[in-house]
Image (cartoon, rainbow, N blue to C red):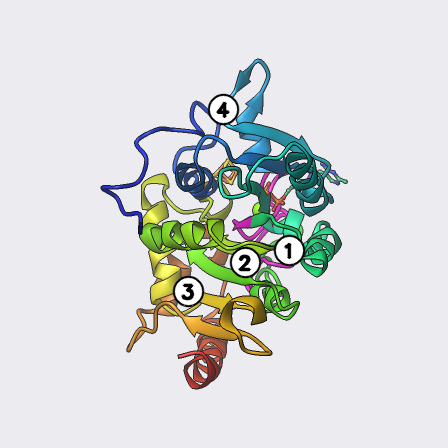
Amino acid sequence: MALNAKTISQDEFFFGHKACAGCGGSLAVRAALKVLGPHAVAALPAGCMSAVGFNFPQLSFANNAMITPFATTAAVLSGIEAGLRVQGKKPDDCTVVGFAGDGGTADIGLQALSGAIDRNDDVLYICYDNEAYMNTGIQKSSLTPFGASTTTTPAGANVHGCLTQKKSLFEIVAAHGIPYAATASVGYLSDFVRKVERARDIRGTRYIHVIVPCPTGWGCPVDSMVDVARDVVDCGLWYLAEYEGPAVSGLPRGRFTLSRNPKTFTSVADYLRSQGRFKALADEEIAQIEAARDETWTYLREHWA
Ligand SMILES: Cc1ncc(C[n+]2csc(CCOP(=O)(O)OP(=O)(O)O)c2C)c(N)n1
Ligand code: SF4
Ligand SMILES: [Mg+2]
């Protein structure tokens, strides 16, 4: 059954945590666990969601949940899945799920994730992407976008923030031929919930990459988090898509599909100007970001629409 705002569980599985007001990451974890239910087993590496969720003796998960070393989310998921299988637990009732940040996924945890996909371990990996190492004070990761000011890419007179481009992690994961992968945003929560539900019901490795604004690190008002999470999609700097690998699509190289293909985009400048982390960007740099968006979408519309 397709879940929606009316039919999703009223039970809470992630509550009483210490996340900042307006934290997008905590909304992603909360919504995903409502879909996965009380028997899901969660693993979280070092990062904001483990820091705010495990404050002994006040633990914020109703599910079984544990913290992993920073690099090992996917390897720990593989181990939990093997243990549950030996105990005769059914994967349909007992999703093994990881919630790891962008740093924990795209940087230090990438080889463990790649290994799990290679073995096609029966686990769901959710990367909550707040575009920097937030828990340790806003350092750049390989998912920090061009132009964002962080403490390791500070905006100054000559350099206006991060000089590198955001890594295309969704495509990197898909290139493994994973059964299912998707991108999402907490600004389009029903789309995210649908993708978690879909991933729950597919066997083998599944990956969801969800954009989660962080008011503290992005420099946006706490009550605009959901709007910012919609804006990044509406202005075309983030796209909502799915990949079905050979096992699901029946096609040798799998299939990409756009979940949303807007006819027109909202203003990139308005999106960037709504956040303190981009405030040093010059008009020419914003034009450069917009041109890159157009180039990306020309490809997406040609190949994924
Ligand atoms: C091996 C190792 N290196 C560094 C750290 C310090 N550390 C803890 S959380 C964190 C930031 C995590 O960033 P991200 O994965 O993006 O999650 P976020 O904090 O943004 O939620 C770092 C660097 C650690 N715990 N272990
Ligand atoms: S710093 Fe950002 S990601 Fe971390 S708890 Fe606060 S709002 Fe959430
Ligand atoms: Mg992060």
Report if the beta carbon of the residue with label 3 is closer than 8 angstroms to ligand 3.
no
Mark 4 Cα-neighbour bin, 10 Å: few <14, some 14–19, many ≥20? many
Task: Report whether residue 164 is seen.
Answer: no
> Mark 4 to mark 3: distance in Å?
29 Å
Which of 64/187 is in front? Answer: 64
- Disc 3 marks which residue? 240
Which of 12/220 is in front? Answer: 12
Q: Residue at x 31, y 47 (%)?
A: 3
- Badges 2 and 3: C-beta atoms under 8 Å apart? no
Up-down relation of residue 299 to residue 216 (above or below): below
Judge left or right: residue 88 versus residue 257.
right
Count of numbered circles on the image: 4
Residue 1 picture location, percent across and down: 31, 50
- Disc 1 marks which residue? 153
> Mark 2 to mark 3: distance in Å?
21 Å
Residue 24 picture location, percent across and down: 43, 43
- Badges 3 and 1: C-beta atoms under 8 Å apart? no
Q: Residue at x 38, y 63 (%)?
A: 233
The amino acid beneath tag 2 is Ala
Mark 1 Cα-neighbour bin, 10 Å: few <14, some 14–19, many ≥20? some
Residue that extends furthest to the front in the rendered view of this protein? 88
Mark 3 Cα-neighbour bin, 10 Å: few <14, some 14–19, many ≥20? many
Tell me where residue 34 sits by quadrant.
Answer: top left
Highlighted range, magenta = 126-151
- Badges 1 and 2: C-beta atoms under 8 Å apart? yes
> Mark 1 to mark 2: distance in Å?
8 Å
Q: Earlier in the sequence, mark 2 or mark 3?
A: 2
Residue that extends furthest to the top in the rendered view of this protein? 57
Look at the numbered disc 1 and give the secondary structure of its residue: loop
Report if the beta carbon of the residue with label 4 is closer than 8 angstroms to ligand 2.
no
Q: Residue 96: give its label.
A: none
Residue 189 picture location, percent across and down: 34, 50
